[in-house]
Image (spheres, rainbow, N blue to C red):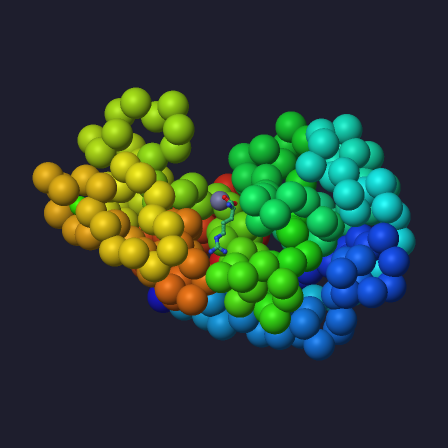
């Protein structure tokens, strides 16, 4: 039987001024976002506990953190805790980049670089149409817990017969789902593409699940690389 675990979260709101367009996400949206994250991880028996929100005005980080150097500089100054502490940074990013995350296995190589960087427009009720229901954070935290995309990555020439996401109960998938349009990109393999999966690329409104296999992988990865004990 799976045991419940609670993991600490620190959030850094990077903004260019104290307006919402400037990145100053209101507390109410942060609360809503944490509620969604916790609902989405309920079947993994993982609770995310927001310990602290730090607000920082820093135009260079807000606008430029997608650049490797600024990303490293910001995290080096701000990151708290060890492998089991989720650090979330909200910044501007481009309209096409919703967020990015490090994987558990990368922690030892670069502990200070560990964490999730979020486009502030993806928080619930914010301005990024179709991607403002809070599912980007769920997706990124899925990566942070060791999940890959359900579809084959670019350059993965094994296609439908490859290892895919290293999870048994997600169907083989060649191409990311867009919008909420059902497809079957590995038509000669069983199963439609997993439109409703948090680790596909569909709109927030259709995302609703991690499979039991994904839950198992996340919990194993957390144990192997993030010193979580059950
Ligand atoms: N493109 C981003 C990534 O690969 C996140 C996509 C999130 N999708 C969503 N519907 N919120 O990490
Ligand atoms: Zn992703
Ligand atoms: Ca199929």
Q: In this picture, is 107 found above or below 170? A: above
User: Nearest the camera: 25 or 117?
Assistant: 25
Q: Is residue 147 left or right of residue 6?
A: left
Q: Quadrant of the N terminus?
A: bottom left
Q: Position of residue 46 (x, y in %)?
A: 51, 64
Q: Position of residue 85 (x, y in %)?
A: 67, 53
User: Nearest the camera: 188 or 48?
Assistant: 188
Question: What residue lies at 58% left-to-right and 74% top-to-bottom?
Answer: 35
Question: What residue lies at 30% left-to-right and 23% top-to-bottom?
Answer: 157
Question: What residue lies at 80% left-to-right and 53% top-to-bottom?
Answer: 14
Q: Position of residue 193 (x, y in %)?
A: 25, 50
Q: How many marks?
A: 0
Question: What residue lies at 69% left-to-right and 37% top-to-bottom?
Answer: 66
Q: Is residue 191 left or right of residue 229?
A: left
User: Nearest the camera: 1 or 100?
Assistant: 100
Q: Is residue 46 visible?
A: no
Q: Position of residue 126 (x, y in %)?
A: 64, 66
Q: Is residue 40 visible?
A: yes
Q: Is residue 44 left or right of residue 20?
A: left
């Amino acid at each position: 039987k799976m045991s419940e675990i609670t993991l600490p979260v620190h959030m850094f709101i990077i903004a260019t001024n104290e307006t919402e367009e400037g990145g100053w996400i209101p507390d109410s949206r942060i609360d809503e976002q944490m509620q969604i994250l916790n609902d989405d991880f309920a079947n993994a028996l993982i609770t995310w506990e927001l310990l602290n929100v730090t607000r920082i005005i820093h135009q260079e980080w807000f606008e430029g953190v997608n650049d490797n150097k600024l990303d490293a500089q910001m995290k080096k100054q701000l990151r708290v805790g060890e492998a089991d502490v989720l650090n979330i940074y909200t910044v501007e990013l481009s309209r096409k980049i919703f967020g990015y995350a490090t994987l558990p296995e990368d922690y030892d190589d670069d502990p200070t670089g560990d964490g999730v960087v979020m486009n502030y427009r993806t928080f619930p009720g914010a301005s990024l149409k179709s991607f403002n229901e809070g599912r980007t954070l769920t997706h990124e935290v899925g990566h942070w817990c060791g999940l890959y995309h359900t579809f084959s990555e670019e350059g993965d020439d094994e296609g439908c017969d490859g290892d895919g996401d290293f999870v048994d109960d997600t169907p083989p998938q060649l191409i990311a789902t867009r919008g909420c349009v059902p497809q079957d990109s590995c038509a000669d393999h069983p199963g439609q593409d997993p439109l409703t999966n948090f680790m596909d690329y569909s709109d927030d409104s259709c995302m609703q699940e991690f499979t039991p296999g994904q839950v198992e992988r996340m919990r194993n990865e957390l144990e192997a690389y993030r010193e979580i004990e059950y």
